[in-house]
Every structure is written in structure tokens, then in C-alpha cells.
């Protein structure tokens, strides 16, 4: 009789199309619901159908009998992280259509899942390939973050450091000179499903040469992107490249400037006035300098200059977005980036904002991601240590959960 009833109930569920996944309950954690709210010292949260059902002090949260429990005593929970500067150009991700799921899952784990990223912004890649990866993740076939993408970038000529890589991998990206060409690229990308556009306002040609994007071309591109309601990133290379970004109305600087002098208060205010968000990518230039055998002393100067720029912008109240340029580099570990951000005077709350609420706001997703609250997406990171004690705790990920499903679990 009991079996009959259970069968009947399950048939009713199937008939009504209800395929409820089990609730998940994280219990006993220190929970940072946002960078600005005080943490809940002994907190629990229940996840249902990919959304936060409840969050609060453990004594007030009702745990459903059927929930899968994750014991978080001694652990720390934050909203899922954004990485606002990545590239779907890692060798293992270049041929999505022909790659098997297991290999792709391994690469997604290594690059993104194990570092807590539940949303990433790819800011230059092959659009069709990246969209194919996005589709395979969203279909549930692969375990990975939500991927937003700009596809192929706009440049007058490709930067010197990607020339060999592009040739070896048979990737051809057209050069863009005129406003008409820029507008055509933006319209094409918007129609195919891009989420933003990247401009090389300054393209490094080596030996101190930088190919600037004409302001008229940059402005035409930016205006067209904004008509589609999308953000524009700029790779500036130098101060002149930043000027083109300011003059054309770009939204986000994709890097600090390792070889440029300190940012004066006047310059910093111009960036702020232009409403530019800044992605520091400090680790990148450490990795690049080591790869190019730049003398230690020179490398140290570059890092110090970037750290000073980040400090200037952060102290001025500029918007900072966490990003590491992974996929261009294979240095996936986020530890050094957090250390350097901290050296720039950013505290753990400001760093958490750069990982969560700042990108959610900048990219128009504040109603769904960036904080832990009822009805928000259940994008969560469970950390082994407390970033309030040491910011490198943001690298010590025990679990990554996206839409209520475990993307990554530390072994
Ligand atoms: Zn990059």
C-alpha cells in the first residue's frame, strides 16, 4: 500500500512536470551575506530550486527533512565570485564542439570552479566557440560558471604578444580602423549573442610602440554597444590608451598600467568622473615579467606602480572589479592577486565587493547575484578560512555552488 502511494505521488510529480531537486542546507557557517552587512557568526542557509530560500542565524532557519546537509561549522560562506577578466582561449577550451565533457569539466575545474567563480566575463576569444561552451554549461552537460563574453575584440592591429598564439591556432581577427567597421562588428556580435565589447584603445606593438584606436572609431563603437545595453571594456596599455577610453565613453578599464607613472589625484578624478571601473590584473604582470626574464628589480617596480594606481583609485572611491586575465595566462591561483590588492590598501570587505556586488551592479545583475538573500540565485562559495583574518582566505575554497548545484568540492 505504501509503495503504491509513493509510486502514485512520483507519477503525479512527473505528470505535473515537477522535477524537484533536493533542497541543500548549509549549516553552522560564518556567513557574509554582503560586503557591507555584519556577518552572521553561526548562520545557515537553505537552497531550493537554484535560489536562496532562507538565510539567517542557525536558530531561526528551518531545515527541511529531505535537505542535503553541508556541515559548514568552522567554515565561511560568501556569495559566488565573479572574475571580470578571463579568456576562453586556454588550449583545452579552443575546440568546444569536438571536446569531450570529461576533459572540459577538468579544465573548468582547474580554471574557474576551484577558485569560487560562478560568473566570469570573457573579454576576448572566438565568439562562436565561447558561446558553444556557454550552451554546454547551461544545458547541464558541463560543470562551469555562467560565461559572459565579448567575443572577438576591436583593434587596429593585434598586440604583439598574441600574434604567434593566434597564428598557431588559426584564429583570425579582423583589424578595425573606421567607425563603420566598428559599428558593423558590434551589430554582428550583438546579433550572435555577445554580452559586451572589448576595445584595444592601445595595442602594444613592442619596443615602446602602441597602436591607438582612433577616438572617432572608439566612440562609434561605444555608442553602438550602449544602444544594445551592453558594457564596453578597454585594454589601454598606456595613459594615451586610457585617454581614448575616457574620451569615447568606455565603461571598464581591463588593466592597471605597469609602465606608467603614478596616477595624480586629477587623473584619478577624471577616471571616476568617466564612471570607469578598474580591473587591476596585478598578478598578470608579475607572471609576464617572469616569463620574459625581466630583472627582479624592474618587475618589482612594475608591481609597485600598479599597486599604487589601484590604491589611488580605490581610495578615491573608484569602482574595482576583480579580474586576473586567466585563459591568457595559465596562472589560475588567485592568492597573489588578493595579497597585492591588500597591499594596495583594500580591506577584505572591499575585496569581497570587487568579487561580488561591484560586478553584479556594473553588469546589471544586482537583483540576482552578488549577495546572499532570499530569492537571489544560490551562487555560493564555502571557504576554509575567514578573509577578515587574512584576505588570501578567498583562495581557500572548500565548495563552489552555482544555481544551487555543487560545481566544485575540495578533495
Ligand atoms: Zn586579457
Image (cartoon, grey):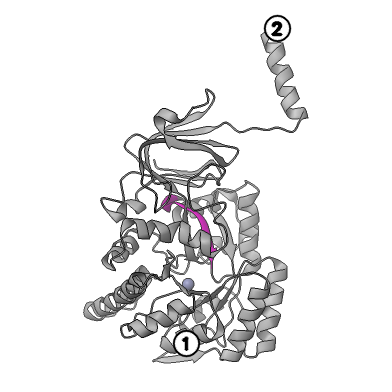
Residue 133: quadrant of the picture = bottom right
Q: Is residue 321 visible?
A: yes
The correct choice, above or below, for 376 with respect to 2 in the image is: below
Q: Position of residue 366 (x, y in %)?
A: 54, 56
Q: Residue furthest top?
A: 1
Residue 150: quadrant of the picture = bottom right
The dominant secondary structure in magenta is strand
Q: Residues within 10 Å of mark 1 (few under 14, many from 20)?
A: some
Q: Which mark is residue 218?
A: none
Q: Residue furthest right?
A: 15
Q: Which residue is mark 1?
A: 243
Kindly identify the residue that appears in the image at 33 percent across and 70 percent down.
315
Kindly identify the residue that appears in the image at 55 percent across and 46 percent down.
376
Is residue 115 inside the magenta stretch? yes
Residue in the foreground of this view, choosing between 223 and 24: 223
Indicate which label's residue lies in the foreground, 1 or 2.
1
Q: Image quadrant for the C terminus?
A: top left
**How far apart are the alpha carbons under marks 1 and 2?**
76 Å
Q: Position of residue 68 (x, y in %)?
A: 50, 30
Q: Is residue 204 visible?
A: no
Is residue 352 inside the magenta stretch? no
Q: Which residue is mark 2?
A: 1
Q: Position of residue 71 (x, y in %)?
A: 40, 32
Question: What span is colored magenta in the figure?
Answer: 114-122
Kindly identify the residue that appears in the image at 57 percent across and 43 percent down.
375
The correct choice, above or below, for 341 with respect to 243 in the image is: above
Q: Position of residue 5 (x, y in %)?
A: 71, 13
The correct choice, above or below, for 119 with respect to 178 in the image is: above
Q: Residues within 10 Å of mark 2 (few under 14, many from 20)?
A: few
Amino acid at each position: 500500500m505504501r509503495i503504491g502511494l509513493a509510486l502514485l505521488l512520483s507519477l503525479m510529480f512527473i505528470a505535473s512536470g515537477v522535477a524537484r531537486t533536493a533542497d541543500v542546507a548549509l549549516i553552522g557557517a560564518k556567513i557574509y551575506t554582503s560586503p557591507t552587512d555584519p556577518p552572521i557568526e553561526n548562520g545557515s542557509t537553505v537552497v531550493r530550486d537554484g535560489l536562496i530560500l532562507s538565510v539567517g542565524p542557525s536558530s531561526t532557519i528551518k531545515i527541511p527533512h529531505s535537505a542535503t546537509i553541508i556541515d559548514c561549522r568552522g567554515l565561511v560562506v560568501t556569495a559566488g565570485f565573479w572574475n571580470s577578466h578571463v579568456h576562453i582561449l586556454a588550449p583545452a577550451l579552443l575546440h568546444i564542439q569536438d571536446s569531450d565533457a570529461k576533459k572540459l569539466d577538468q579544465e573548468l575545474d582547474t580554471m574557474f570552479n576551484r577558485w569560487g567563480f560562478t560568473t566570469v566575463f570573457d573579454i576576448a576569444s572566438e565568439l562562436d566557440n565561447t558561446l558553444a561552451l556557454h550552451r554546454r554549461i547551461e544545458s547541464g552537460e558541463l560543470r562551469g560558471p555562467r560565461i559572459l563574453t565579448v567575443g572577438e575584440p576591436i583593434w587596429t592591429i593585434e598586440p604583439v604578444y598574441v600574434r604567434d598564439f593566434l597564428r598557431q591556432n588559426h584564429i583570425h581577427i579582423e583589424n578595425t580602423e573606421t567607425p563603420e567597421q566598428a559599428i558593423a562588428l558590434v551589430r554582428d556580435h550583438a546579433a550572435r549573442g555577445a554580452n559586451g565589447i572589448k576595445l584595444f584603445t592601445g595595442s602594444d606593438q613592442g619596443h615602446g610602440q602602441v597602436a591607438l584606436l582612433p577616438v572617432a572609431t572608439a566612440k562609434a563603437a561605444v555608442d553602438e554597444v550602449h544602444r544594445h545595453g551592453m558594457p564596453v571594456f578597454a585594454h589601454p596599455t598606456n595613459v594615451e590608451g586610457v585617454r581614448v577610453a575616457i574620451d569615447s565613453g568606455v565603461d571598464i578599464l581591463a588593466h592597471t598600467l605597469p609602465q606608467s607613472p603614478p596616477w595624480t589625484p586629477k587623473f584619478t578624478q577624471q577616471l571616476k568622473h568617466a564612471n570607469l571601473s578598474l580591473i587591476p590584473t596585478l598578478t598578470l604582470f608579475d607572471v609576464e615579467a617572469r616569463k620574459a626574464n625581466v630583472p627582479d628589480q624592474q618587475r618589482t617596480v612594475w608591481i609597485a606602480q600598479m599597486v599604487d594606481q589601484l590604491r589611488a583609485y580605490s581610495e578615491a572611491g573608484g569602482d574595482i572589479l576583480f579580474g586576473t586575465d586567466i585563459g591568457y595566462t595559465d596562472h589560475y591561483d588567485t592568492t597573489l592577486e588578493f595579497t597585492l590588492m591588500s597591499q594596495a590598501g583594500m580591506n577584505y570587505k572591499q575585496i569581497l565587493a570587487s568579487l561580488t556586488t561591484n560586478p553584479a551592479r556594473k553588469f546589471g545583475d544586482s537583483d540576482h547575484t552578488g549577495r546572499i538573500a532570499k530569492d537571489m540565485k544560490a551562487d555560493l562559495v564555502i571557504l576554509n578560512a575567514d578573509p577578515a583574518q587574512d584576505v588570501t582566505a578567498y583562495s581557500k575554497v572548500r565548495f563552489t555552488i552555482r544555481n544551487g548545484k555543487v560545481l566544485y568540492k575540495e578533495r
